Amino acid sequence: MQEKLILQSETYKSSYMGIYGQLFTTFVKIGAFTFGGGWAMISIIEKEIVDKHHWIEREEFLDLLAIAQSLPGILAVNIATSIGDRLKGMKGGIVAAAGTILPSFLIILAIAIFLTPETIKNSHVLSSIFMGIRPAVVALIIAPVITTAKAAKLKLTTIWIPAVAALVISLDMGIISNPITWIALGALGGYAHWEYTRRKLMHNS
């Protein structure tokens, strides 16, 4: 009986530590091989979290992405923390965030020690490498935009909304070009649509 309890305890501990280990290694891999900032990470995070590990559904991933964008701070860390918290609470959020931050910290530390702007500028090899990375970064940023649009079920009647928002944000028009304004408008619009649908269903019933 005692051996059985010990075995169950070890199995539980292995499973308990396993998810944290998977979270950490997954986000370390994402952080180490992503260039171009948070948006470039989104497609890789989606493939790892949704398609490979099946930890959350795609719709829930989009909800967490919306929350991460609305919060202050770095998008990559915000989405990693949100996913970790969704899976394993605060500890999961800390582990996922640490996994995301660690590669960038080590890479920047190595660059600060061994490379200088003059070294990169004067080295044709390094300059060529960074020039080659730029198109890949653009592709990594565009990919999540397309997949997010598909998952959000945008139609010809609604695609004008993000198009107009992106255009206005890119222009210098004061508070109306502030992304926070559009986040607030989106939240209000979503609530208004939910309230309208709820009242319509109540009226029909």
Image (spheres, helix red, strand yellow):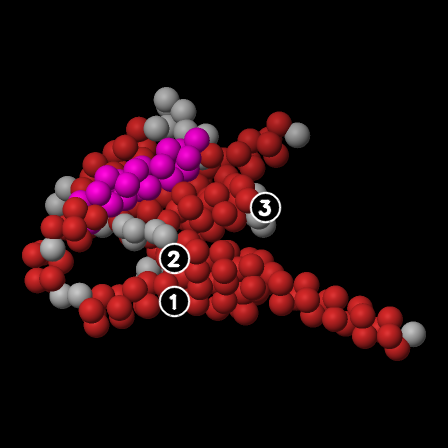
Q: Is residue 1 left or right of residue 180?
A: right
Q: Nearer the viewer, residue 118 or 201?
A: 118
Give the class, few, some or many, for how many residues have Cα within 10 Å of label 1's Cα (few <14, many ≥20): some
Q: Position of residue 164 (x, y in %)?
A: 25, 34
Q: CA distance from mark 3 to mark 1?
A: 24 Å
Contact? badges 2 and 1 (CB < 8 Å):
yes
Q: Nearer the viewer, mark 3 or mark 2?
A: 2
Of the numbered discs in the image, which one, if any, rests on residue 31?
2
**Which of the 4 image quarters holds residue 198?**
top right
| Residue at position x 61%, y 34% in the image | 202
Q: Nearer the viewer, mark 3 or mark 1?
A: 1
> Magenta includes 189?
no
Q: Nearer the viewer, residue 126 or 203?
A: 126
| Residue at position x 46%, y 45% in the image | 46
N-term-proximal mark, 2 vs 1? 2
Q: CA distance from mark 2 to mark 1?
A: 8 Å
Q: CA distance from mark 3 to mark 2?
A: 19 Å
Give the class, few, some or many, for how many residues have Cα within 10 Å of label 3's Cα (few <14, many ≥20): few
Amino acid type at image mark 1: Leu
Element marked by disc 1: helix
Amino acid type at image mark 2: Gly
| Residue at position x 32%, y 33% in the image | 161
Q: Position of residue 108 (x, y in %)?
A: 26, 66
Give the class, few, some or many, for how many residues have Cα within 10 Å of label 2's Cα (few <14, many ≥20): many
Main SS type for the magenta part?
A: helix
Element marked by disc 2: helix
Q: Which residue is mark 1?
A: 102
Q: Which residues are magenta?
A: 130-150
Element marked by disc 3: loop
N-term-proximal mark, 3 vs 1? 3
Q: Is residue 50 left or right of residue 120?
A: right
